[in-house]
Image (tube, rainbow, N blue to C red):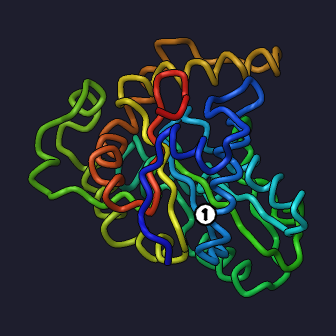
Amino acid sequence: MSPRLHLSAEHLSAIHPSVESSPTAAGFDAALVAAVLDDALAADARIYAICGLQGSGKSTLARQVAALARHRGLSTAVLSIDDFYLGRGERQRLGRTVHPLLATRGSPGTHDLALGCDVLDRLRAGEPTRLPRFDKLRDTRVSPSRWRRVGAVDLTVFEGWFLKTPAQDEDALRIPINALEREHDRDGVWRAYCNRALAHNYPALWSRLDRLLFLQPPGFGIVADWRWQQEQAMQAKRPQRQAMTREQVERFVSLFERVSRQALAELPAIADWTVKLDEGRRVV
């Protein structure tokens, strides 16, 4: 296993001196993309994980790494933890029986972890695999008959916003972290449920990840801005789609604030490689 890395723009320029270390409109620059793929290959990682908070560009980077791998003759698959959301009906049941906030997808406890482990195991073993897909516009999982089928792959890039984030101490759950928790989770049932899921359910999925890259933002405060930029881009791409307002984006992001802050505090010491980003998603 390769050592933990904390690469700066200067390090990336040294690895790939012909390319500057700054993102382009099409995504991250070639220096970072090539360095990530080289890191995966050097570590012999079959399942390479990219973690970054909302709007950090983790999905874009995952697609770029896979494209470069295919250019080098490697077969690849790209998956997101979002692909393993529970369906709307299952989350609504959790909302009725545990806490209403669990009806909203995204937080720990709203994923089908057994499916995630099975799919990653099949990909690692080189078996033909159907890749799940979640339709965010319809807010439910696509029918399995429409999942893309892949054969044996050399590399799977797996991305998500809280990969390998550990649970908090229970004492840290007592005080609400924002207005949403104060108003909608006064007794702490929702955050305790999410925290128990992090402690007891998700480690099985994390154990399937061979290596972890963390895209570290300058702080949680930038996440709402990044998520708003995503919302505007999606609206421009799909004008018929009903977009969230800035206020709705702020509330949506607050659902993930507690676990996001835990990720910011803990992942630099857990991830195998941490890349710091500035407010413009440039490597710093």
| Residue lying at 30% horizontally and 67% vertically, measured from the top left | 199
Side of 148 relative to 251 (left or right): right
Counting from the top left corner in percent of width and height, residue 80 is at: 64, 54
Name the residue rendered at 35%, 48% in the picture: 263
Q: Secondary structure at mark 1?
A: helix
Residue 102 seen anywhere in this rendered image of the structure = yes
Q: Nearer the viewer, residue 23 or 148?
A: 23
Residue in the image at 73% along x and 53% along y: 65
**Mark 1 crowd level (few <14, some 14–19, many ≥20, 10 Å Cα):** some
Q: Quadrant of residue 218?
A: top left
Q: Which residue is mark 1?
A: 39
Q: Amino acid at mark 1?
A: Asp
Q: Quadrant of residue 44?
A: bottom right
Where on the picture, by quarter, is residue 71? bottom right
Residue 79: image location, x then y, percent = 70, 58
Vertical position of residue 260 compared to residue 127: above or below: above
Q: How many marks?
A: 1
